[in-house]
Amino acid sequence: MVLAAPLLPLATQPRESAVLVDFDGSISAIVDDPAAAHILPGARDALAGLVGVIGTVAVVSGRPVEFLARAIDLPELTLVGQYGLERMVDGRAVVDARAEPYLDAVAAAADEIERELPDLLVERKAGVAVTVHWRKAPEREADAITVVDRIAEHHGLAVYPTKMARELRPAVPADKGTAVETLLDRTAHACFAGDDRGDLDAFAALARLEKAGRLEDAVRIAVGSTEVPAELLAQADLVVDGPVGLVSVLEELARAATRTPR
C-alpha cells in the first residue's frame, strides 16, 4: 500500500506531526452494546507503531477515558474522552472542573430516563454524561428524543446527538474541536480520523488552525460506513473504507514515518 498523498508531510516530519483518531466506528467496529466494543487488534498495533515516532498520537472520543485505557491498553497513548471533558493524566481520569457543578444533574437525569425509558439502553458515562441508545429498537427514536430533550431542558444539560443515540452532558463549551486545538499546540502537521457528527467539530478545528497559520498541513479523514454523515464525507480530505481501511492507513503511515532519517 502506498501512503496517501495528503499524509506525506506527517511521514517526512513525524516529530512535528500529530495523529488523532476517534474510537467507535474508527478503530473499533460499531456494536449494539457499547460495553461490548473492542479495538481492532491491528489498530492497537498500528497506534503502538506510531507512538514514539509521531510527535503526538491520541484517541479523542466520546467514551470515558477509563474505558479507553482498558480497551486500548497502550499507556503511552494520549487519551481524551467525553468529547473533551475528560483526560487521562498520569493514569488518572481528570474531569474538566467546569463540568463538576452539573454532575448531580447528570445523575438525576439518568435516573429519570431509566424510569421513563426502561426498555432502552441507558449508558451512564463515569458520572459525567448519560447516553440513551436505540440501536436495538430504532422504532423508539422519536420517543427517546422527546424524553431526553425534555429532561435535559429541565436539568439545564446540553444535548448531544450521536449515531442512533442521544447524550445529556454538562452545558460546557467543550467538544472534540476544543480538544484538538489543545492537543495541536506547536504542531506543524496533523490528521484526525472519525466517522460521526461529533467528529465534525474536530474537522472544523483543523480547518481553523490551518487557516490561522497554526498548522501547515491538516488532513481530515472520514471513516466510511453506511451510517457516516454526508457532511463528514463532504469535508474529508481522505475517505477510508471502514475501520479496517483506517488501520491500513495508520500502518502505512507508521512504516513511512519510521523510514524517515532522524
Image: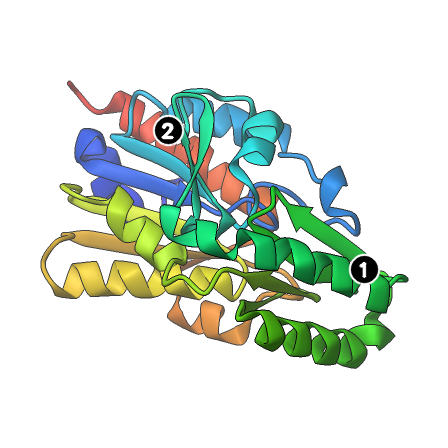
Residue 230 x, y percent position in the rendering: 53, 75
- Can you tell which quarter of the image residue 54 is in? top left
Q: Give the mark nearest the N terminus, 1 or 2.
A: 1
Mark pair 1, 2: CA separation: 44 Å
**Mark 1, secondary structure of its residue:** helix
Residue positioned 17% across, 42% down in the render: 187
Residue 2 position in % (x across, y down):
39, 40
Residue 33: x and y, percent? 78, 48
- Tell me the residue at 37%/27% (across/down): 50
Count of all numbered marks drawn on residues in the image = 2
Q: Which residue is mark 2?
A: 254
Residue positioned most to the left: 213
Q: Nearer the viewer, residue 196 or 160?
A: 160
The answer to whether residue 190 is left or right of residue 60 is: left
Mark sitting on residue 114: 1
Name which residue lies at 53% across and 58% down. 195
Q: Quadrant of the C terminus?
A: top left
Type of amino acid under label 1:
Glu
Q: Can residue 42 be seen? A: no
